[in-house]
Amino acid sequence: MSEESLISCDLDFDQDGKQFGNLAVPQSTNSAGWAVSYIPLFVVKNGEGPTAVLFGGNHGDEYEGPVTLMNLARQLTPDQIAGRVIIVPMLNRPAVAAGTRLSPIDGVNMNRAYPGRRNDSITGMIAHFVSTRILPLADFVIDIHSGGSSMHMVPSVNMHDLGETDQMRRMLDAGRAWGAPYVFIYEDVAGEGLLPSLAERMGKVTLGTEMGSKAQFGVETLKITARGVRNVLHWAEILREPPGDRGVENPVFVAADDARDYIMSPSSGILEPLVELGDEVDSGQPVAQLHSLEHPDLAPEPVLSANRGIIVSRRSIPLTTQGECIAVTARAFQPCPGAR
């Protein structure tokens, strides 16, 4: 069976100039037996040079990426670059339109769907097109995320620890170039199939982000996001002119490399946070407490940190179900030798 994608694209990735078009994802729905779902994308190209691929809206309740990338796509002109920039501002457009983390069409998490299959449900079909048609073109990959509806996050650039490799050194350098307050090394604790994980395995210089959250969405997080994208494009020698504002010159490098850093709720109830982003905590320190809905006469149940570190993320939704992440601790991370 052919592995060629069933999705069609009306753009020529090799054509110089600026193009706007769509991916057409074939669908069959209750209201239309023959239909397509459109995923918008932009290509800006000027001669030979490296290629950067920029994704937003991987999760539909994280709007920093779509806003930043739609603005960039409208503003960027071919004469400003050397090489190619491929912009997908709403990778999971159905979820972005619904304001949901998962696709409202098939209930799938786009960031757990890679590499996908050609005849998958809509989310997996998009993941398959990205895996087979877009990522192979890339030298640099940026996947913009935030805490969405459920988590507050320190503004950070993130990546996995790939050890003392040239790829990791370049990723750390790119992370520093972004100009965000933190560079965050994270672990996959909620499954596999992440877009950044696939891009890293393909050898791409890959950056994810956690730019605040739905509740933090505003001028400052959008500024950090927009400035950072341009900073990295300039660092990659794609954007000719340096941005006027470089942001934070010496970000804090932190890692949450122990599964126990991801503190899961032991019970269900109303969550009362006891720490804020950036706070330092000790092992065994209460970071939150849970109030029982069924037994309001009982003292709240404390939730303890397993590790010493700083709080880089905390839950933003008070009503909490057992097993949901309520906070993340991280410790100082030493960049590998050779990273600037």
Image (cartoon, helix red, strand yellow):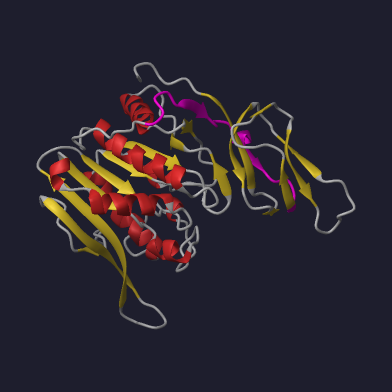
Q: Is residue 50 left or right of residue 170?
A: left
Across and down, in percent, residue 316 comes to: 62, 49
Vertical relation: 335 (above or below) 327: above
Vertical relation: 44 (above or below) 121: above
Note whether residue 202 is visible. yes
Foreground residue, 147 or 9? Answer: 147
Position of the N terminus, as image quadrant, is bottom left
The boundaries of the magenta stretch are: 247-269
Position of the C terminus, as image quadrant, is top left
Q: Is residue 49 magenta?
A: no
Q: Who's the residue at 18% across and 44% down the image?
A: 84
Across and down, in percent, residue 225 comes to: 39, 42
Q: Which quadrant holds residue 286?
A: top right
Across and down, in percent, residue 261 comes to: 61, 34
Note whether residue 204 is visible. no
Q: Is residue 100 left or right of residue 73?
A: right
Foreground residue, 54 or 29? Answer: 54
